[in-house]
Amino acid sequence: MGNRKVLVTGGAGYIGSHTVVELFQAGYTPVILDDFSNSDKKTINRINKILNTEVKFFEGDCGNEDYLEKIFLLEKDISGVIHFAASKAVAESVQNPLKYYDNNVGSMISLLKVMNRSDINCLVFSSSCTVYGNSAEQPVRETSPVLPAESPYGNTKHVCEQIIRDFSFSKESFKALSLRYFNPIGAHPSALIGELPIGTPANLVPYISQTAAGIREELTVFGNDYNTPDGTCVRDYIHVIDLAKAHIRALDYIFQNKSAGYDVINCGTGKGNTVLEVIKTFEKVNNLMVNYSIGTRRPGDVEAIYSNVDKAKDLIGWQSSLTLEDALRDAWKWEQTLQK
Ligand code: UD1
């Protein structure tokens, strides 16, 4: 879909930055909007280094309608938007729910209003498997029930999906896909971009890498008394590069006029791994030991969740191709870059 210009909100973030790289390599022209509230400006230079180009970027808040309007005016021919910009710390969202509704839901509404006024009719939204909650059916399908969210963060993803769906019903030319991510891990194989946790990481793989690097003394495994093969939780860990590629397939699908309106797609590998399997695999592929101990369960954790991937294959022709080993090798390479 050569040369189409796509606005990437949150394009300096973890999944956003990898998607910008993949977009450019697929022939799209990405334009980044980021307020750097949870990302680093250096990421832009690093993206440019990987691509050997200068990707256009705007610094600002995606909830600012005037600013968005200005970007669409300046960058006349933007034909689609990938919307990543959002706050994503589950625990913080419980402490400060209004920040989450304001940032995540507020910016979604602003973006749709401005897209509507500017007649930009293609949207890919960054959603999460968190909408399935503690699902009784595994693997989860897109038709599995959406359960009440465990956190305000999770609820913002569900609410945003509904807002997009309702808006798409009101405007026939508007097409959108919500991608429900499972657990993105790993980093770009160049080790130039990756996840940048601020403070103590909440997520498993950055915590493992930091423990291996000696920044954290010990990793706590949150519970080993779940009803799973080794008692630890099961998740569907997907390489961030594979996930980034799903966005390109989603855009292609919309731009090729294959989309009927609004839809949701699971983005996972289709395979579940336990926390202990992730730790062991990290140790094996990187030839090192991770200091860990078993602790108590983390409140709000679901026992197991992994994806059924049929719809992604059928609808947008996408499936993951990298392995857990690849992702954990790249995660460690990235951690070592951070230490330099
Ligand atoms: C959750 C959400 C996801 C959201 C993400 C944001 C679900 C199913 N997923 O991911 O949508 O985007 O938070 O942060 O609700 N673990 C440890 N020790 C640690 C850290 C994690 O044992 O120090 C375990 C957890 O108990 C869990 C697994 O590792 O079983 C993965 O945890 P994490 O990386 O935080 O992701 P989720 O909680 O699955």
Image (tube, rainbow, N blue to C red):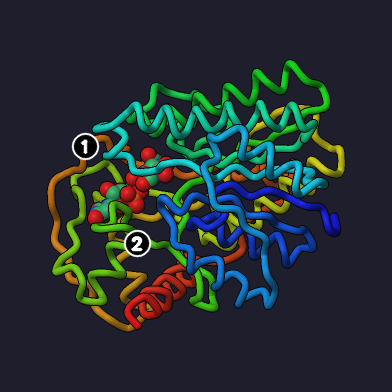
Mark 2 touches mark 1? (CB < 8 Å):
no
The three-letter code of the residue at mark 2 reads Val
Left or right: residue 46 versus residue 81 is left
Q: Is residue 199 above or below residue 260?
A: below
Q: Is label 2 within 8 A of ligand 1 (CB to nearest ligand atom)? A: yes
Q: Which residue sits at x=32%, y=79%? A: 339
Q: Which residue sits at x=54%, y=75%? A: 189
Locate residue 130: give its quadrant. top left
Locate residue 120: give its quadrant. top right
> Could you tell me which quadrant the C terminus lies in?
bottom left
Q: Secondary structure at mark 2?
A: helix
Q: Is residue 35 visible?
A: yes
The three-letter code of the residue at mark 1 reads Pro
Q: Which residue sits at x=28%, y=39%? A: 92
Residue 205, labelled with which disc? 2
Q: Nearer the viewer, residue 158 or 233?
A: 158
Left or right: residue 112 versus residue 157 is right
User: Would you call the spot at circle 1 few (<14 residues within 10 Å), some (14-19), or many (20 or more)?
Assistant: few
The location of residue 33, given as percent across then percent down, is 59, 50
According to the image, label 1 marks what residue?
A: 299
Residue 8, labelled with which disc? none
Q: Secondary structure at mark 1?
A: loop
> Could you tell me which quadrant the N terminus lies in?
bottom right
User: Would you call the spot at circle 2 few (<14 residues within 10 Å), some (14-19), or many (20 or more)?
Assistant: many
Q: Is residue 282 above or below residue 336?
A: above
Q: Which residue sits at x=45%, y=71%? A: 325
Q: Nearer the viewer, residue 112 or 82?
A: 112
Q: Nearer the viewer, residue 262 or 338?
A: 338
Q: Mark 2 and mark 1: span between their CA atoms?
A: 19 Å
Left or right: residue 214 versus residue 110 is left
